[in-house]
Every structure is written in C-alpha cells, then in structure tokens.
Amino acid sequence: MNPNKKRLRRTMMFLNAQKPGLIKDPYIYKPDSIMLDLEDAVAENQKDAARFSLFHALRSIDYRGCERVVRINGLDSPYWKEDIRCSVAGGCDSIRIPKAETKEDVKLVESEVIKAEREFGRPEGSVLIMAAIESARGVLNALEICEASDRLFGIALSGGDYTKDLQTHITGTGIELMGARQHLVIAARAAGVQCFDTVYTDLNNMEGFRQDVETIHLMGFDGKSIINPRQINTVHEIYTPTQKDIVFAEKVVKEIEEKKAQGIGVFTVDGKMIDIAFYDGAKRTINLAKASGVYKGDL
Amino acid sequence: MINAVGREIPEEILKITGKEVFQGSHHFDGYEYKKQGPVTKCVINSNGSKLVDNIHDVLVKCGIKDGMTISFHHHFRDGDYVVNMVMKEIHEMGIKDITISASSLGKAHEPLVEYIEDGTITNIESSGVRGGIGEAISHGKLKGLAIMRSHGGRVRAIESGETKIDIAFIGTPTADEYGNCCGIGGKSDCGVLSYASADADHADKVVAITDCLVPFPNFPAQISMTKVDYVVVVDEIGNPDKIATGAAKPTTDMRKLMMADYCTQFVVNTPYFKDGFSYQTGVGGASIASTISLAKIMKERNIRMRFGVGGLTKPMCDLLQNDQVDVLLDTQDFDLAAVESVKDPRHFPISAGEYANPFNKGAVVNKLDFVILAALEVDVHFNCNVVVGSDGMLTGAQGGHPDTAAGAKCAIVIAPLLQGRIPAICTDVTTVTTPGETVDVVVTDYGIAINPRRQDLIEAMKDVDLPFKTIEELRDIAYSITGEPQKVEFGDRVVGIIESRDGTIMDVVREVKPFEFRSKE
C-alpha cells in the first residue's frame, strides 16, 4: 500500500492551478494538502494554459511536504484524460475525481492513472485517488465508490452541487447536509478510507466557520476542504487534541503494550475500562498531537 | 572612498558636496555646532495685515530670483495642490535654477517633471520621490544632484544651515490674516503641520497658503504668526479625499496577517514589552495588523503603552480611545480617524525636529522601544533599501525609517520574502538607505531573522516557538525559488545621494541604463 494513503489530511486547500501567485508558495500557510484545480476555477478556453502552469509548478516548486492533489475535469468533459497525463507527468501525489457517482467512475480514472504512470515512468501505485461526491446518487453509492480501488484514500462531500441536486441550498445551519455527511462518514469508515467535508464559502463569517468545523470534527470527518489560508488555523486548532486527551491516550497506549506482554486483556486507566479496541484511537490521538506540534513525548 | 556600510562613494561626489562618508550611526554623538538663524523682517506697525492677493505677488514680495531654495511640506500627501501651484507661477515668471527642499514629493507632483526638464528646477532635496519625478532623476534629467534625506536628517540640514531656505511655502488648512497656522479645521484638514516647523523657524521668508481664512487669533497655532511673513488665500490647497482617507480596512491577506502575528509574538517576548513601553509602526497592511494584534495581547496581560509616535493611523488612535496608551506624539495623520484624534488632549502634535533630528539635544525616536518598519530590500548585513526600486529607479522615501531604526531599542522590519518575483532578502541591497547596524529583526512570511549583533534578543528568544532562521537562510530560500537575480545595471553618472541622518553619505544613486536585450549566447 502507498504509505501516503493514510497520511494526515485535516485541511485541503483549493487553488486555481492557472494562477501563479496562488500556487507559487501556498505551503507557507501549512495546509496538509493543496488541491490544484483544473475544473471549475478554470475557464473552458483556458484548460490547456492551466495544465501548462500546473505541470511546471509541480515540476519546479518544492511544496515542502504538502500533499499535491489535482482536481481534474469531469468524466463527461473532453479534458479529464489529458488532465491526468499532465498531472502524473508533473509528479502529483493524488487525483481528485469530481462528481463521482459509481465505482465505474473510479475504475475508469484508475485505468488512466495506471497508463500515465507507465507512460511517464512513475512507480505503479504512486498516484493516489480521491472521489468527490456531489449528487444524491453519489451519496447512495458511497460505499461502492470507497471500495472501488486500493488507491482511493478517501471521499469528499461537495456541498454546492449536492444541495442543488437535492433541490435545496446551503443554509449555513448544516441541516441540508446532515444526511449526506452522516452517510459519507459511515461509508468511508466501513471501507477504511478517509472522509472530508465540503468548503465553507462565507469567508467573513469566521464564527460560523468554526462552528461548522466543530460539527464535522465531532461527526468523525478527517478534515475539511478550504478555500482560503485564513481558514487553516481554525481547522488545525479544532483538530488538535487537548492536553487531557493526549495524556490519556499516552497512558492507554503504554498500558495496552505493557498489559499485552503480561497477558492481560482488560484493565482500567483513570477508572475507565480499556481493552485492545482502544489502541488505534489512542494512537491516532498521539499522531494528531505530533502533527499539531503539541506532543513532544516518546511514542 | 568606502563607507561604513561598504559602499564606494566617488571622491568627486565628496568634493562637490563637501560631505563625509558614513562612519557609523553614533559617529557624531556629542558633536557641537551652532544652529543657523533666518533673516527676519520685523513687523512693528499695527495697521497691517499680512494678506497678499496671489502667489505671483507674494513671490515678487519675497524677491524670488534664479538659484533660490524653495521649501514645501507633504502633509497633504497625494492630495497636495500647493507645490504645483507655486512652481507653476515660478515657471511662468521664467525663474531658473530653483532648488526644491520638500519634506517629501509624491504622485501629486508629476507636473514638476516638465520644470526639471526645462531647468526651472535643478536641484531636489526630499525624503523621497515617486513616479515621474523619480524617473526623471534616474534618467539624468535633473541638472544637479537629488539629495534623499530622512525626516530627521532634513531638519538637521535646515537647522545647521546646510540647506538655506529662501522662501518656505506652508500650505495650512486654516490661517488668520496674521499668519497663525493650524492643521486642524478648514476643508483640507491634515491634523498637524510637523514637517513645516523647521521651515518656519529657519526660512528667510515664510508664506502661509490657505483655503480657509479664520478670524485672528487662530489659536492654538501650530505655526506661529511670529515666523510668518505673508498669507495668501487660494480656492483650494488640496483634495481632501486624498489628504486623509477613510481608515484602511484591516487586511485579510493571510500572508500579511501571518507576518503581523510573527511580529507581535516577537515583540511580546522581548524584555522591552512591559508596562510603560513605547511603540511606532507604519501604515502597511502587516504593520497595522500587528498593532491590532498587539492591542489584544496588551489587554490580556494588562500592559499599558506609555507613548505611541509617528505617522498615525486609526489602530494607534484606537489605543488612545481604549485607554491603552497614555499619550500619542504625532508627526503626520494618515486617515480621518487620526486627524480627528488630534483634538484629544492626550494627542500631541510634535515637530519633525522633536521627532527625529539627530543633531538635537535628544529626539523622541531615541526613547522608542519598538519600531515596526517595512522595506523594499534587506540584505544579509541587515542593510535596508526603501528608496530605489528593483528596476533601479528612485521610487520611495526614507521617511523616518533610518531615524527610528537608529533610535529604537528594537527595530523590526517586516517584508515578504519575495516582492512579486524579486527576492526582498538578498546578498546586497541595490542602495543602502538604513544601515544594518540599526536593524535588529527581519520578519518575513518564511521566517524571522535576528541580527547577530543582538545576541541579547537571540538569547531572549531561545525558548520561543517562532520560525527563526538566519538572514542567510532566508536569502537562500528566496534564491532557491527565484534564482539569484542579476544586479541592476547603472550608468556612470551619479544622479542622487542617499544622505545619512547625520549628513554623511550612505550611498549614491546612479543613472539607470536603458534595458538592452541580450540572448544568453
């Protein structure tokens, strides 16, 4: 398995791949992933120019550990195959499929990615895939989409198109997204992949944004798509485990490892019953704390 | 001759100007000299008004002739009409060989280009120049030398007699018929007249120009009648919309906010951040944002500022309104909130001399704890350039940059690592305007560098979680992204000098060389 499949992805920042000013150094804001967009942000007659700038950016800019995802054009467009060739040739880490509705969509993209990996001499499996769910059908088929390819690291809800399909609109309350959000997280977890929430477009309402992130954090999402670097710190802050969580997780990991050696399966930590089922969650907390720069321990 | 910042100053320039090369910021500490006084024509009879009908007549009364030095202030910024109004008349009278001594020249003064080209104006002394005037000087159209001085340096030059002003024209938002001038009131309110103070004290003839005549006495007067020879009333001295704008909206540019945050975090972790500290900042987005974030931390930690100084903006005046600072010392007002704040009894107008003249018996800048500055370029020696653009053209102003950097205990320069595709952190700045020995910290979007001369600050920051780097590391990151830029090519002729605040030569500016395409072969 590609070791990047499970990497930390709290923030995925959309950037128009055609704009040099945007794509030259977004890593200074420290998003976990950047999403270089060839689709909606780029005008129909500028697709080739955007690919050109994308290719050279991928080739020449050191993104300093930021994951480089490319959002290709829809599978119903004449552009997506060339988008994949260009992205893979440039050295992207992942491809985001827009408007995914079925497992066949994922397989179709996967086969083009494989071809491109061969054509440009990249190791097979080096390019990952994620799928954006933007319709009612996509939501209902989420599980088959999640399980369609080993390369697929996760799915993302795209709220704008999805609410249109549902014949409603973004209200700011989240009520219109409730069902999809819940369903996608469940499907992703069932398939063992990651799940990302939709963008929050009202840049001036930072309080609303914070509440939105707190909600999706509690729902179990791995992260959120963002549209401006101003949103990054809020997401990272909310996803940073508290000192209490970290201390508890550290105890759990250490105790489980110790008790396992002694042949003990169930025991208590700080008065709470703990068994092996807690191990992965505690490890995840420690890893998140490390990534957030708040854990300096030895685990 | 090589000066203390490693710049070669041609002997010929030293000979022409009679100046010395820069020998270090404190070279003249304790220096004694006698100040120059103006020729004063007494007004003893009690039947006169000082009103003169128009600019032409006042020029005649002042005895305008070829070769004179005429001075102006820049409180009306991009809205100024006074400089053009006076120079147009001088031009029409056929006067030649004028030296303009302005506290600054800006975009409002493009008509001067024509007068430079036809020899009406042959010398310019200013804090800075922009646009067409800068290009004209850089293309060698000014017959004499352009002298770029800091605000403090200009007052030093005037008071020491190095610059002898024949006629000072002081645009004033209000005046009475006896010449009491005030920056407050009228339709072209600019708040204060700080930069005109030295002109009023030392020019042989002083003319107040206003578009709002008020009954005598216009008190409290910022420029006293005791110094003013004539008063001229005109229709408009400026465009109020460009003199003081509405307060700039706080920036939402994350890059600037990030730099502001680094800056504030640095400030609050220094030993100087304690009750009673003092602070100055500029008008750039990052500087303003850092004032806003600093105010929050002051509130949280219950720390009070003793004084804020400088060109003022709304966020600084908000500190006064919110009772977080004892007093503001004001040399210039950048927005309407600052102009309005002048009426507060805790908000004091000060002269440019009180603010920054190094040849005083002490200036306010010497009492500063922090100053937050910007720069076009900073080099690995921490030298800053704020006057010459990356194309080699004169296009900026020293302002109080070298003065405050020299005075403040902690001078912080905020600059993005790249200005467009030009590295702002480089091996050698195109032109040195502020010497690196006075610059303590550089904050960029890629990290913060502390001047190795300040081991005390390095020590204070050793446990602080900020992205510290050496200045060389910052330069290397910049070059790794853009490549090492080729140096701007200049011609041989020196067209301007960058004068240090003490009157020595910091650097020279040469004529630009027209760009010539060359293929790599």
Image: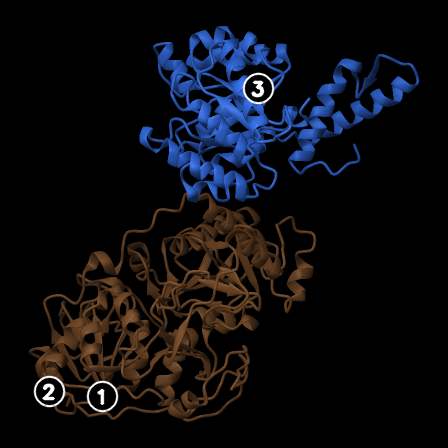
Chain colours: A blue, B brown
Label 3 is found on which chain of the structure?
A
Q: What residue type is labelled 2?
A: Val
**Mark toward the viewer: 1 or 3:** 3
For label 3, the crowd category at 10 Å Cα-Cα, with few meaning under 14, some 14 to 19 and many 20 or more, is: many
Q: Mark 2 points at which residue?
A: B60
Query: Label 1 lies in what chain?
Result: B
3D distance between C-alphas at marks 2 and 1: 13 Å
The outermost residue toward the front is B521
Q: Nearer the viewer, residue B296 or A70?
A: A70
Q: Which residue is drawn at 17% across and 77% down?
A: B87
Q: Residue A81 in the image: x percent, y percent? A: 46, 23
Q: Name the residue carrying label 1.
A: B68
At label 1, which amino acid type do we have? Met
Q: In which quarter of the image is residue B18?
A: bottom left
Q: Is residue B9 visible?
A: yes
Question: On the same chain: label 1 and label 3?
Answer: no
Q: Do the residues labelled 2 and 1 touch (CB within 8 Å)?
A: no
Residue A154 has which mark?
3
Q: Where is residue B432 in the image (x, y as percent from the top left)?
A: 47, 72
- Indicate the amino acid at tag 3: Gly
Name which residue lies at 64% across and 14% down. Answer: A192
Residue A179 in sight from this viewpoint: no
* Circle count: 3
Coordinates of residue A280 in the picture (x, y in percent)? 73, 19
Question: How far apart are the two marked residues, 2 and 3, measured between alpha carbons?
Answer: 83 Å
